[in-house]
Image: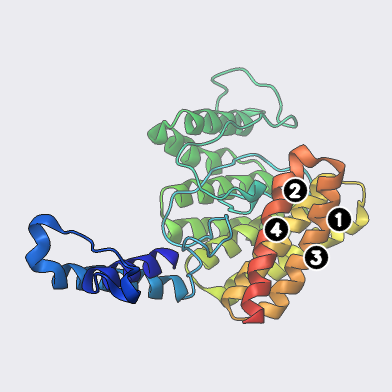
Amino acid sequence: MLLGLALGGVAYAILNPGGLEGRIPPIPLGAFESLRFYVAMAAAGLGAIIFIAALLPKGPGGPSGGGGKTRRKGGAPVTIDFNDPAPMTAHDSGSTHAHHAAEVVAEAPAVAEVASEPEVHAGAPPGAPGAFAEARRALHEHTRAERWSEAADNVRRLSSLAGDEHERRLAAQDAGDFARAQGLTDQAADAYDEALTYARQIGEPAGLADALTNIGDVAYEEQRLDTAVDAYEEALALRRAFAEAQPADVAAKRALSLALERLADAREDRGHRMRALDLYRESLDISGSLAAADPVAYGEDLAVTRRRLAELEAKVAV
C-alpha cells in the first residue's frame, strides 16, 4: 500500500515540478523528458494497481491468507509422513498445520522407524511375518531418497502384503499420501476413503482421526468446504476425547490444537468467522500451555497461532 502511495507521489512530482509552493524539486527525466506525461501516467497507474491490490482481501492461498501458514489450496506438492502415528497424534500427511510449517516441501523428510514393527530379514517373501513392515520401511527409504518409481512399486505391494484390517488401513493411508504427493487428488481421496472404512470397522480412534483428517485436507484443497468441515468436526471430537482422557499427554494436546485450527480455517473460508475465532482462541490456550512448558519445541506454534488469531480479530473488527 505504501509503495502504491509512493508511486502516486512520484507521478504528481513529475507532472508538477516546483509544486506545493516550490517544495517539490524538478525530477529530470533525461532522454525521456518529452515523455514526461506518459511516464507520470505509468507511475500513477502502477501505484493505483498496487494500492487497490493491497486493499483487496487476500485469498486463503495468498500472501497473508494463512498468517505464515500455507493454506491447503491448489496442487502444490505435499510433505509425506508415512509413520504409523502414536495413539491419537496427528498424522498430518501434507498438513500445513503440522509444526505450523508454512511451506510444503518437495523433499520428503527423514522418517523415524516405527518401533512396533517387527525386525525382519531383507527379502522376506510375501506373506511372511514382517513382510508388510519391511515393505513399509522400503517405502520410507525410497521416499526419503526420492526414488519415486521404486516407492510406487512398494505402494502397490502393500495392499497385497497386508494381513489384517489394521495393515490394510495403513496401506490405504500410504497410498493416499503417495498419490497426494504426486498431485493425484482423486486417487488420494479414494485411498483415504478406503482407509476410513477400515478404521471404522476396527474402531481404531487414532486411525479414524487420521483418516478423517486426510479426507478433510483433500476436500479443503478442492474447496469442498462442507465435506472438509464435517470431516474435521468428527476428527476434532476424537482428538478432544483422547486429550481429556490423557491430560498429561503432550502429543495429544498438540494434536487437539492442530485439529482446532484445521476446523477454524475451514469455517473461516465458509464465512463463519466468529466460530473460527472461538476455535483459534481455544487452540491459543493449548499452544500457550505447551509453549510455557517447552518454549523451544512449541514457541513457534504459539507465535503463529497468535498471528492467525490477530488476523481473524482484525477481519471481524472491520
Q: Residue furthest top?
A: 121
Q: Is residue 204 visible?
A: no
Badge 4 is on which residue? 305
Q: Residue 283: where, in percent of width, then height?
A: 77, 61
Residue on which disc 1 sits? 243
SS class, disc 4: helix
How far separated are the C-alphas under marks 3 and 2?
A: 18 Å
Q: Which residue is mark 2?
A: 89
Q: Residue at x 75, y 53 (%)?
A: 255
Q: Residues within 10 Å of mark 2 (few under 14, many from 20)?
A: many
Q: In the orientation shown, which residue stands out farthest toward the front?
A: 21
Q: Nearest the camera: 139 or 67?
A: 67
Query: At label 4, which amino acid type do we have?
Result: Thr
The disc at residue 282 is 3
Can the viewer see residue 76 in this picture? yes
Give the x, y percent position of residue 90.
70, 50
Sequence-earlier tag: 1 or 3 = 1
Residue 23: quadrant of the picture: bottom left
Q: Which mark is residue 253?
A: none
Tag 1: Cα neighbours inside 10 Å, few (<14), some, or many (≥20)?
many
37 and 134: which one is in front? 37
Question: Which amino acid type is marked by label 2?
Answer: Thr
Q: Spatial distance from mark 2 to mark 1, Cα to Cα?
A: 10 Å
